[in-house]
Amino acid sequence: MNQPSVSMNDTGLKNDLLIRACQGQPTPRTPVWMMRQAGRYLPEYQAVRAKADFLAMCRTPELATEVTLQPVDIIGVDAAIIFSDILVVPEAMGMKVTFHDGVGPVFDHPIDGPREIQALEPVVVEEKLGYVLEALEMTKRALDGRVPLIGFAGAPWTIAGYMVEGRSSKTFAKVKAMRYTRPDLLHQLLDRLSHVVSDFLLAQIDAGADVVQLFDSWAGMLTPDDFRVFSLPYLKKIVDRVSVTGVPIIVFARNAGHSFTELSQIGAQVLSVSWSEELAAAKAAVQGRVVLQGNLDPCALLGPIDSLRQEVIAVLDCMGHNPSHIFNLGHGILPNTPVDHARALIDIVKEESVRYHG
Amino acid sequence: MNQPSVSMNDTGLKNDLLIRACQGQPTPRTPVWMMRQAGRYLPEYQAVRAKADFLAMCRTPELATEVTLQPVDIIGVDAAIIFSDILVVPEAMGMKVTFHDGVGPVFDHPIDGPREIQALEPVVVEEKLGYVLEALEMTKRALDGRVPLIGFAGAPWTIAGYMVEGRSSKTFAKVKAMRYTRPDLLHQLLDRLSHVVSDFLLAQIDAGADVVQLFDSWAGMLTPDDFRVFSLPYLKKIVDRVSVTGVPIIVFARNAGHSFTELSQIGAQVLSVSWSEELAAAKAAVQGRVVLQGNLDPCALLGPIDSLRQEVIAVLDCMGHNPSHIFNLGHGILPNTPVDHARALIDIVKEESVRYHG
């Protein structure tokens, strides 16, 4: 009763719950996956990570495939998301990035002005990001239609933020200073990024991605007014170009709940909601125009299973009967999450969501 | 025309714009001050800081007074806010805190369970926090009625967050895990803190504070539902106790815009709005029940003066004619802000806001 359709369908997928939910079609239960599900909370991931650094894992299709499959096998999620990083794009544009434990990604030469922007290299995706495409193809084969495969890229504003800051920042003060001192330059950078990201997502779809997600992880670093000027139009540009494929697009503009209405009108099928936002408010703002994804607080996985079940039910209750909903966390799963809690979450959603459907 | 009333009034203040604005009374222009206005962007502050560490500055009334007065003299703000830190409260409760450059405050022994909570010492404010009261009295004398003096404290949730995390955290995962595993303990801690904070604010008012502000800097680390359970009731408890003095209370629940309506109903006179939130949405949510404070993005001070003026006008426009408004930043002023831009901001608000009044 709470099983997905088990026969092959026209998508070639044995479990196509995510695809059908993205398209707003009825499903027997709510599909569920977790942001960063191929991640440090899994001992099997740690074992691979012990042998290779983060970027090497991204660049080696065998390793990327291995960790992408882990949560499908171990946790039972309804989708795989390719193991990669949003910063492969600026790297492909010629910006050297290194990952430091405890610090995160660091660019050797952040963008400071027009000179660095002009120096960015054009990106032929197949040449510069072929390793991501290869990982997608390899994962697709290995999945053998068990669940859909999600491709992804960072949104222009979020990538630009890292490129200008040079590293993670509490305030994004450098890129926001550029917004005031040289808005023309920032727009130029965002425009270039929107082209590369569009090409990249189209190539990922060619390589087998069944769904793509755009991560605007730092959307909340912009004021609401600025989000509508420096992020939203570039998200729309990308969605416009990628939409021709018919592949569903999920947009995750973290902490940009002020613009749910506008975000629901750019042509993406799904809007992902952060845990810091009110799912009910998102539902009211989007007026059925898009499917919602989210938004359990990842910290709920650190508590006992009983309270986890209550939190899951609260999310399901909020979305109501026959919901246009994909269950997910409101941000990435935390590294210190117990594996059995992650598995319990997936089981609870599979079990509890049935009664909200049909 | 854009001058405050220059004659002494019943508050004994030469410039009482802030007080009148807090009470919703008409003013000839919008009062303006900046969070963290006694801070690192001022060379005069840096000079004092070079001689004493951060906590020593808080603990030495002469130094606290000196830096509290600096922005009044140098920048021309309409209020002084006592130089101190929200973590003086857990320190008074017996938790040793040290400040590390680049890391921020660190507790040697964070709260891990009931044992540490039981070990917290009772606080007789005059004994444990007398140095803050002395700084207020000294500052009050030195100000000689030029502008009002603001006292402040951290909100229970924000202080508890630091006490459990032990240091600043991106996720607040420890205290949020406690919220799921031992909500009873967290409530016990929050309740104790609300008593100490109330006592502390009442003592600050006795020592001369004309206005007090409650900083719930990490309100946005709670889900909207959890904010209403683990923060809002404790803010209300404090406001209830402090209100008897008649001294205006400003509440700054950063990134808790989801609860503007509820926040406007706890009895505080003023709600401070983060830059990440829509001032227009705040205005609509509070329906004239409270005065709004904010909410210029501190990054706007990093741009040219022309764009700064535009941003100020946008805020003033949003608040409209005869606004119930105190101009402020939507978060603390950044250390790399040019001093002449800080001064320009104050001048621009004084100049531009006149035509919105009377």
Image: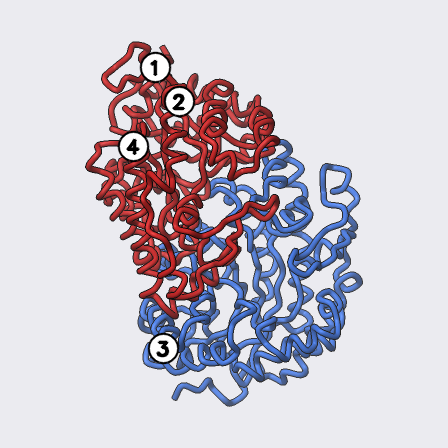
Chain colours: A blue, B red
- Mark 3 = which residue? A306
Looking at the image, residue A302 lies above or below residue B154: below
Mark 3 touching mark 1, by CB under 8 A? Answer: no
Which residue is drawn at the image coordinates 61% and 45% (left, top)?
B102
Residue B190 rendering spot, x and y as whole percentages: 33, 55
Task: Measure how far apart labels 3 and 1 are at the Cα level.
Answer: 59 Å
Mark 2 touching mark 4, by CB under 8 A? Answer: no
Task: Measure how far apart labels 3 and 4 are at the Cα level.
Answer: 45 Å
Q: Is residue A282 visible?
A: no
Tag nearer the camera, 4 or 1: 4
Task: Measure how far apart labels 2 and 4 are at the Cα level.
Answer: 19 Å
Give the mark, 2 or 4, whose residue is nearer the N terminus. 2
- Mark 2 = which residue? B78
Asked which secondary structure carries label 4, the reply is: helix
Could you tell me the amino acid type at mark 2?
Asp
Which residue is drawn at the image coordinates 52% and 27% (left, top)?
B308
Give the mark, 4 or 1, whose residue is nearer the N terminus. 1
Tag nearer the camera, 2 or 4: 4
